[in-house]
């Protein structure tokens, strides 16, 4: 296996990993927001006087759920556009072989 095929495989797997990071983060956030909103509505329907307190807690949890998605998206974009750490490791290992 020559160096160009190894570099190509590392780059293609990195793109697949970044796509999975972004898509699974979006899927998890969507499911999380759906469950969070549903439980909020159940709680307000059961005890309407606790609505403002439940809404405040719901917004705090929504921020935490959204932060998870933002961190995953940033990690995926770093694999896309920044220096790929996997590719750097492969190039460092193969540098003595190439030169």
Image: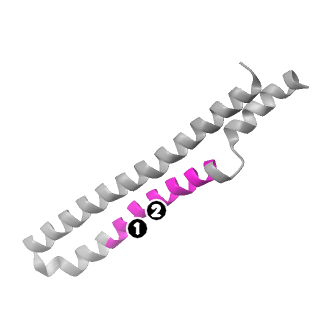
Q: Is residue 71 left or right of residue 31?
A: right
Residue receiving disc 1: 63
Q: Is residue 91 left or right of residue 75?
A: right
Dot label at residue 67: 2
Q: Are marks 2 and 1 in contact (CB under 8 Å)?
A: yes
Dot label at residue 53: none
Residue 10 placed where, x, y %?
A: 64, 33
In the picture shown, does residue 11 fall above or below 18? above
Residue 53 placed where, x, y %?
A: 24, 77
Q: Residue at x 36, y 70 (%)?
A: 60
Looking at the rendering, the stretch of residues picked out in magenta corresponds to 59-79
In the picture shown, does residue 57 fall above or below 96? below
State which quadrant residue 68 falls in.
bottom left
Magenta span: chief secondary structure:
helix
In front: 9, or 63?
9
In space, the residues marked 2 and 1 are separated at their CA atoms by 6 Å
Residue 7 placed where, x, y %?
A: 70, 32
Q: Which quarter of the rendering shows the N terminus?
A: top right
Look at the image and say whether residue 36 sits in the magenta stretch.
no
Q: Which quarter of the rendering shows the C terminus?
A: top right
Q: Residue at x 75, y 38 (%)?
A: 88
Q: Residue furthest left?
A: 46
How is colour applied across the structure in the image? one colour
Q: Residue at x 30, y 76 (%)?
A: 56
In front: 4, or 94?
4
Residue 63 placed where, x, y %?
A: 40, 68
Q: Residue at x 35, y 52 (%)?
A: 28
In front: 57, or 90?
90
């Amino acid at each position: 296996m020559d160096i160009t095929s190894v570099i190509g495989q590392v780059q293609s797997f990195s793109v697949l990993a970044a796509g999975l990071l972004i898509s699974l983060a979006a899927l998890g956030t969507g499911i999380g927001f759906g469950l969070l909103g549903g439980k909020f509505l159940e709680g307000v329907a059961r005890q309407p006087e606790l609505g403002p307190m439940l809404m405040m807690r719901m917004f705090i949890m929504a921020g935490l759920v959204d932060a998870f998605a933002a961190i995953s998206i940033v990690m995926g974009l770093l694999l896309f556009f920044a220096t790929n750490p996997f590719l750097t490791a492969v190039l460092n290992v193969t540098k003595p072989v190439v030169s």
